[in-house]
Image (tube, rainbow, N blue to C red):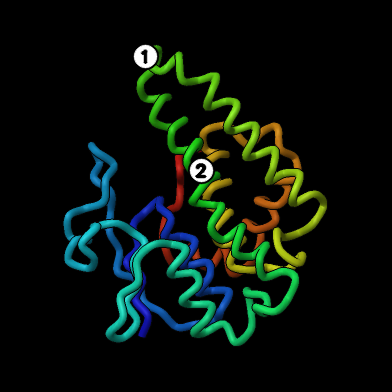
Amino acid sequence: MITVHHLNNSRSQRILWLLEELGLDYEIAGYKRDATTNLAPPELVKVHPLGKSPVITDGGVTVAESGAIVEYLIRKYGKGKFMPAENSADFVPWLHWMHYAEGSAMLPVMLTLYTMRLGDAAAPLRPRLESEIANHFGYMDKALGKNDFFVGNALTGADFQIVFVLEAARSLGLLRPFANLNRYLDAVHARPAYKRGVERGGQYDLGG
């Protein structure tokens, strides 16, 4: 049985969505953020030394890191879904978007969150962060265009990775100028499997 070690209001929500789209049986071990620090509880260290979520256990296998979990589940259980064939023209774009989401796009979002908490002390950083947000989210908005998904116009692992980035950006008010990304995110939120994942995982609110 797959167990998702699920932290509220975190990246682990994307794993629940993927599992629902795959139609797999799984169980949830729930964890709550500290009300003061907003950090994960120390109990997660017992699952993985980093003490972070998401983490899954699948029999005797423990997998951490969102991208690794998404790829592991798709390769093991996807039966050809959510990943293009390695000899197809879509495979390299799939690799790009799988890694781009957390490797590049998420960084200016996180830095924006931290600088908001610093108030006026962060003023020198804001022009650079605004430039990075415009660059990365403009890139994604243009790449998506009128398509429904990022790779091959079909739901793939790349979408499970990207959606959390967009949700975090929307919660900070950063997504407003990007019509294609807003349309895409709303369509994902309307998917039955996405809704089931939220229902099973509990309240999901990144603050927006």
Is any atom of residue 78 visible in this view?
yes
Number of residue marks: 2
Disc 1 to disc 2, C-alpha distance: 23 Å
Q: Residue at x 56, y 52 (%)?
A: 100
Few, some or many C-alpha atoms within 10 Å of disc 1 (few <14, some 14-19, many ≥20)? few
| Horizontal arrangement in the rendering, residue 17 relative to residue 89 (left or right) | left
Q: Is residue 78 above or below residue 114?
A: below
Residue 91 pos. (x, y %)? 67, 70
Q: Residue at x 31, y 86 (%)?
A: 59
Farthest right residue in view: 146
Name the secondary structure under disc 1.
helix
Residue 52 pos. (x, y %)? 29, 56
Residue 82 pos. (x, y %)? 63, 74
Is any atom of residue 182 visible in this view?
no
Residue 4 pos. (x, y %)? 36, 70
Indicate the amino acid at tag 1: Ala
Of 28 and 145, the residue lying toward us: 145
Q: Earlier in the sequence, mark 1 or mark 2?
A: 1
| Horizontal arrangement in the rendering, residue 52 relative to residue 93 (left or right) | left
Please identify the quadrant where the N terminus is shown: bottom left
Which label number is shown at residue 141?
Answer: none
Q: Which residue is mark 1?
A: 121
Q: Which residue is mark 2?
A: 168
Q: Is residue 114 above or below residue 207?
A: above
Q: Residue at x 53, y 45 (%)?
A: 104
| Labels 1 and 2 touching (C-beta < 8 A) | no
Indicate the amino acid at tag 2: Ala
Name the secondary structure under disc 2.
helix
